[in-house]
Image (cartoon, rainbow, N blue to C red):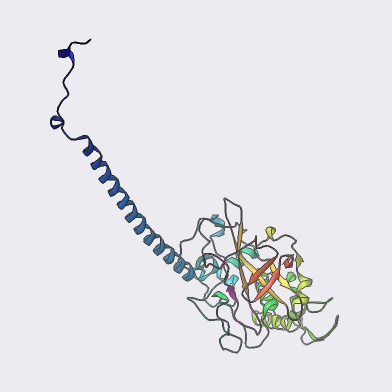
Amino acid sequence: MTPENDIPEAEPAEYHDEPLIDDEKPMSRRLRYLLVLLAVGMFVGGIVWNYQKARQLKERQQGNSPEAPTNPRSLEPPPAEAYPWMKHYDAANSIHNRIPPPPGTFRVDVPPDSFAHWLRYLPVKAGQQKVMLHTGKPKRNQRAHWMVLDIDTGPEDLQGGPEAILRLRAEYLFARNEFKAIQFHISAEEVLSWYRWRAGDRPVSVKGEKVTWNRVATTCDDSYANFRAYLNAVFKFADTNTLMKDIKSVPDAKNMRIGDVFLHPGNPGHAVIVVDMVRDPKSGDLGFLLAQSFIPAQDMHILANAYDPEGLPWYRTNFGEKLQTPEWTFQAGELRRFP
């Protein structure tokens, strides 16, 4: 047996610095403080996040959001004379500078002198304007558009859906002096070319595939005023069926380009045009903006997208079998392109 005096005596509890049960109290308090601070931080962070989200959405609607980085070649706008209907063209009020890409996406790269680049820099009216009819009265449906393009409609009921697209294509070619390319079908078989019009030939009537012509001048008139008269003549005979003759099919929407057209031929029919595109560098997904006029003739405008989760006007190429726009539903196979 161990001698009794070799067993150490138990130290009385009152000699400990702190009772064992009290060792856990400071830790419990610190944990509670940390949890409270974490909860407060999450609450405040949520308020800040919601505020920033609302502010960003408002800025996007007003066109004041910062531009996402893109290829420098795409940042230089076309010269002012590229938009001859404008007395004072200002690239600050353009699609490119007023409608930023969705967060995390970049505008697709396009050649500086291309139709795509020209469309991207189309002028838009300042602020949130109403869409006006050719009569000067406001359109009944003011929820279909995001912004209004700054391009005239004219006093007559001519510049509807397909005609607006022909107007944009013709204006681009005219500004580049590509006069031979300015020709559009006015019947199933015959075209009305700017060269023939400027030389003095005028279409009098169209019956089926036959066009009756009349010569009214012997000298060429290259003026912009005469060019606009030419366009009005095209508009009088053109429709979605004749536009079908001027553009070719694009089988897969994933191969979409700026300048492509969604076209549903018929009576009635409709057409809208892709005026800008973006790409998500991570997923490779494409987004696009659409512009249209409609019937009766009205201001061209950028279409809103009621199905975008962020409330932005950008559509996505993975829309499936049908593309739902505010005033028309297109089929996936109705995408077409100018040659």
Horizontal arrangement in the rendering, residue 249 relative to residue 282 (left or right): right
Task: Find residue 74 and report its horizontal and vertical position in percent.
Answer: 56, 59
Q: How many marks?
A: 0
Say whether residue 106 is magenta.
no
Q: In the rendered image, is residue 178 in sight? A: no
Q: Quadrant of residue 273?
A: bottom right
Answer above or below: position of 328 versus 120. Answer: below
Q: Measuring from the top left, give residue 128's x and y in whole percent.
A: 49, 77
Q: Which image quadrant: the C terminus?
A: bottom right
Query: Residue 317: horizontal and vertical position, in percent?
Result: 65, 61
- Residue 299 highlighted magenta (yes or no): yes
In this view of the protein, which residue sits in the foreground, 300 or 254? 254
Residue 16 location, x and y as percent?
Answer: 16, 31
Horizontal side of 120 relative to 252 (left or right) equals: left
Identify the residue at image location x=66%, y=83%. Answer: 295
Q: Residue at x 17, y 35 (%)?
A: 18
Range of the magenta residues? 292-316
Rendered view: 82 above or below 233: above
Between 73 and 64, the residue placed more toward the observer is 64
- Please name the residue shown 32% across and 50% down the image: 35
Q: Nearer the viewer, residue 303 or 73?
A: 303
Q: Looking at the figure, which quarter contains the N terminus? A: top left
Residue at (63%, 72%) from the top-left corner? 325
Viewer can see residue 280: yes
Taking the view exactly as shown, the residue that stands out farthest to the left is 15
Prevailing secondary structure of the magenta residues: loop
Q: Quadrant of residue 253?
A: bottom right
Q: Is residue 109 above or below residue 83?
A: above
